[in-house]
C-alpha cells in the first residue's frame, strides 16, 4: 500500500458504512429515532454519533476505573486501605484516591486526581447521554428525562437543548478523558505498580 493510500485508508470518513433510508421513510436517515422530515440527515447522524461517543467514552472510563481499583487492591501498600473490593463506582473512586496518597503512587497522583475530578464533574453529562430520550432538531438535540425527584411524590422533568457544535465539543472532551484513563493505566503498567491479578 502506497503512503498516500495508507493515509487515505486511516482517515477515510464513515459515510460509506451508512445505509440510505428507503424512499418511503418519512425521515432522511435510516438511523433516525423518530419520524421527522424536517431534520437534515447530516444533523441526525451527527447527533447520534456524538451521543454514541459520549456513552462509549464513559463506558470505557468506568470499566477502567473498575479495572484500576481491582489491580491496585493487590498492591502491598494497599492492604490496610480496604477490607473488601469496592463495588460501587463512588467507593472505587474513593479507594483509588486513597491509593494515590501512598508513597509509591504520589508521582502519578496529579494525573489520577485530574482524571477522577473530570469524571466526577461530567457525570451529569454521562447520565443524560445514557438515559435521556433525544430528539434531533435542525442544528440541535433536545434531551428529555425524569431526574430523581427532589420532593417526594412530585415528578420532575428536565429538558436540555444542546446545539450540535456544543454536543460535538462534549463528545470530543469525553473521548479525550477516556484516553487519559488509558494513559494512566499505561504509565502504571510501565512502572510495575499494577500487580497482576492472581489466577484462581
Image (cartoon, rainbow, N blue to C red):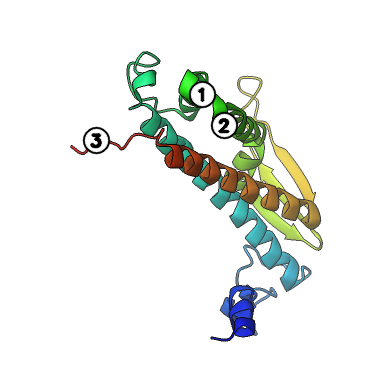
Give whichever of discs 2 and 1 has the lower sequence position: 1
Q: Left or right of 65: which side holds 2?
A: right
Say which quarter of the image contains residue 123. top right
3D distance between C-alphas at marks 2 and 1 = 7 Å
Q: Left or right of 13: which side holds 140?
A: right
Q: Position of residue 21 (x, y in %)?
A: 62, 79
Give whichever of discs 1 and 3 has the lower sequence position: 1
Q: Position of residue 80 (x, y in %)?
A: 36, 13
Q: Which residue is mark 2?
A: 112
Mark 2 Cα shell of 10 Å, populated few (<14), some (14-19), many (≥20): many
Q: Which residue is mark 3?
A: 198
Q: Disc 3 on helix, strand or loop? A: loop
The residue at 68%/45% (across/down) is 144
Q: Which residue is mark 1?
A: 100
Q: Disc 1 on helix, strand or loop? A: loop
3D distance between C-alphas at marks 2 and 3 = 24 Å
Amino acid at each position: 500500500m502506497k503512503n498516500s493510500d495508507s493515509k487515505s485508508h486511516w482517515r477515510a470518513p464513515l459515510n460509506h458504512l451508512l445505509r440510505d433510508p428507503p424512499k418511503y421513510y418519512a425521515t432522511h436517515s435510516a438511523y433516525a429515532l423518530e419520524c421527522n422530515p424536517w431534520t437534515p440527515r447530516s444533523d441526525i447522524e451527527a447527533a447520534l454519533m456524538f451521543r454514541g461517543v459520549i456513552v462509549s467514552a464513559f463506558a470505557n472510563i468506568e470499566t477502567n476505573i473498575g479495572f484500576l481499583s481491582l489491580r491496585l487492591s493487590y498492591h502491598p501498600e494497599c492492604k490496610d486501605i480496604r477490607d473488601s473490593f469496592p463495588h460501587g463506582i463512588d467507593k472505587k473512586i474513593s479507594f483509588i484516591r486513597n491509593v494515590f496518597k501512598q508513597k509509591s503512587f504520589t508521582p502519578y497522583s496529579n494525573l489520577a486526581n485530574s482524571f477522577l475530578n473530570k469524571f466526577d464533574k461530567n457525570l451529569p453529562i454521562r447520565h443524560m447521554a445514557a438515559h435521556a430520550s433525544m430528539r434531533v432538531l435542525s442544528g440541535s438535540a433536545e434531551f428529555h428525562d425524569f431526574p430523581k425527584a427532589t420532593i417526594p411524590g412530585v415528578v420532575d422533568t428536565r429538558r436540555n437543548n444542546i446545539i450540535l457544535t456544543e454536543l460535538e465539543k462534549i463528545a470530543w472532551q469525553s473521548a479525550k478523558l477516556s484516553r487519559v484513563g488509558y494513559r494512566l493505566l499505561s504509565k502504571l503498567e510501565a512502572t510495575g505498580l499494577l500487580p497482576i491479578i492472581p489466577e484462581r
